[in-house]
Image (spheres, grey):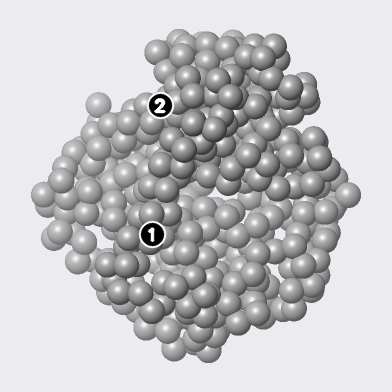
């Protein structure tokens, strides 16, 4: 019975991730701060029930995670000046939600992952419409409010437009959602019969239009990584190229329709304007590649520079988060560093900071190992989902509530999608019989 309740709580967690920005911006802006921690009671209850059912297994990663959490708290309490409330938020940001990655596959069947995917496809349509409205609206318009119901707080794009966040508080949430949607769309085209083709085409069109008006390199890059997973999959399944032919027609149709819409042209112009501002537009392909890889690897190298400036015990867990800065100074800003790796090292010091980062790498390696094994068995879904979330697990700014949510849910869905248990429901029977990637029984 506890497994059933855990399953329901995970669904609640999913809906809170999706709707958190709606509550913070429009429905109850006065409770914006409260919704930053709205998922915490849910995830704590999940853990309590999971412990009762012995679903949180004492693996090496989980034991190291718990020990590191306790050491980091002790260090912050006795060797830094971080306030207790800031330390508590730091624990929530850095540690609380990651174990969810390993709980979700204990209670989610492949049918649950498919249902999540169906809702993602459905939600991508109103999401695109909302992003178009936000793109066309004034920066201080109601639709462009930020958390707390404040106008003018969204990030600027090109041509005087904002970077529309859709349902979410900021554009980062929209980018993470679009990456997840693109993974589901690709899987749907590869596995005919799992989702209605009309829904896939409309959702694919929604992704293209949302990306066009987003003016977000993060969104474009995240979707690009999902597509790159098709190339990675070839390393494990040499029959893949023959099967990829089936996605060319629907993707070509989507691009043909999207590029002939006026809103796509307006979005492209605004996107190009922002790229011109950042210097990417006039750069060569080599210079663009160097710039984008610099943005990725710069997070790693900046942590080394931060380690030289950080006190041995750090400044205290939570001090580098926006919320931590607000609790200390009353202002929301990056108090220590914007990059995630640099923030961790400055908060926890060189020793505990890098141990924490290596544990996040260990989680990625474990998830990838299982996803690669699934591809060998003909199941491409886990690797596509992995493409949508592995950068979040590696360098995602988990001090931000939405990023934290997509990190926990994304990693958990990858592992749940690796299941190859016998189909039980009609949905699962359809999934098993669908081609070209049938699931194999254990």
Q: Quadrant of residue 379?
A: top left
Q: Residue at x 46, y 38 (%)?
A: 305
Residue carrying label 2: 358
Above or below 313: residue 331: below
- Location of mark 1 (residue): 292
User: Could you tell whether 38 is left or right of 305 in the image?
Assistant: right
Counting residues from the N terminus, which is met first, the one under dot 1 or under dot 2? 1
Residue 263: percent from left, percent from top: 55, 84
Q: Secondary structure at mark 2?
A: helix
Q: Look at the numbered discs 1 and 2 and tell me whether their residues touch, using CB distance below 8 Å.
A: no
* Location of the N terminus (image quadrant): top right
Residue 344 in view, yes or no: no
- Residue at image position (35%, 74%) is 283
Q: Residue at x 18, y 59 (%)?
A: 243
At 21% from the left edge and 61% from the top edge, which residue is drawn?
A: 244
The numbered mark at residue 24 is: none
Q: Name which quarter of the figure residue 420 lies in.
A: top left
């Amino acid at each position: 019975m506890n497994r059933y309740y855990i399953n329901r709580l995970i669904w609640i967690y999913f809906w809170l991730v999706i709707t958190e920005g709606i509550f913070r911006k429009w429905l109850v802006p006065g409770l914006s701060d409260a919704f930053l921690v709205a998922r915490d009671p849910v995830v704590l209850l999940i853990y309590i029930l999971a412990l009762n059912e012995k679903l949180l297994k004492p693996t090496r990663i989980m034991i190291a995670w718990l020990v590191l959490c306790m050491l980091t708290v002790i260090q912050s309490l006795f060797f830094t000046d971080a306030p207790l409330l800031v330390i508590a938020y730091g624990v929530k940001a850095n540690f609380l939600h990651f174990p969810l990655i390993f709980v979700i596959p204990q209670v989610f069947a492949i049918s649950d992952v498919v249902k999540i995917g169906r809702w993602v496809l459905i939600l991508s349509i109103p999401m695109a419409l909302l992003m178009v409205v936000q793109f066309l609206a004034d920066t201080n318009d109601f639709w462009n409010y930020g958390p707390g119901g404040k106008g003018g707080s969204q990030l600027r794009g090109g041509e005087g437009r904002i970077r529309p966040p859709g349902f979410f508080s900021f554009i980062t949430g929209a980018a993470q959602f679009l990456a997840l949607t693109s993974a589901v769309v690709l899987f749907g085209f590869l596995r005919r019969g799992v989702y209605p083709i009309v829904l896939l085409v409309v959702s694919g069109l929604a992704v293209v239009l949302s990306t066009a008006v987003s003016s977000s390199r993060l969104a474009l890059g995240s979707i690009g990584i999902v597509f790159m997973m098709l190339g990675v999959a070839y390393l494990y399944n040499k029959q893949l190229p023959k099967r990829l032919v089936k996605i060319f027609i629907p993707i070509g149709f989507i691009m043909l329709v999207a590029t002939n819409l006026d809103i796509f042209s307006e979005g492209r112009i605004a996107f190009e304007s922002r790229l011109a501002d950042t210097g990417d537009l006039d750069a060569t392909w080599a210079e663009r590649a160097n710039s984008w890889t610099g943005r990725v690897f710069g997070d790693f190298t900046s942590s080394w520079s931060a380690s030289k400036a950080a006190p041995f015990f750090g400044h205290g867990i939570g001090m580098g988060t926006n919320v931590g800065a607000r609790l200390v100074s009353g202002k929301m800003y990056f108090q220590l560093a914007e990059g995630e790796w640099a923030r961790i090292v400055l908060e926890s010091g060189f020793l505990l900071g890098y141990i924490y980062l290596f544990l996040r790498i260990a989680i990625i390696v474990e998830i990838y190992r299982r996803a690669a094994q699934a591809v060998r068995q003909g199941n491409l879904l886990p690797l596509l989902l992995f493409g949508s979330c592995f950068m979040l697990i590696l360098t995602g700014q988990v001090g931000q509530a939405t990023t934290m949510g997509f990190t926990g849910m994304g990693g958990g869905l990858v592992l749940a999608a690796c299941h190859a248990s016998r189909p039980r429901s009609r949905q699962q029977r359809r999934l098993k019989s669908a081609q070209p990637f049938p699931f194999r029984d254990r």
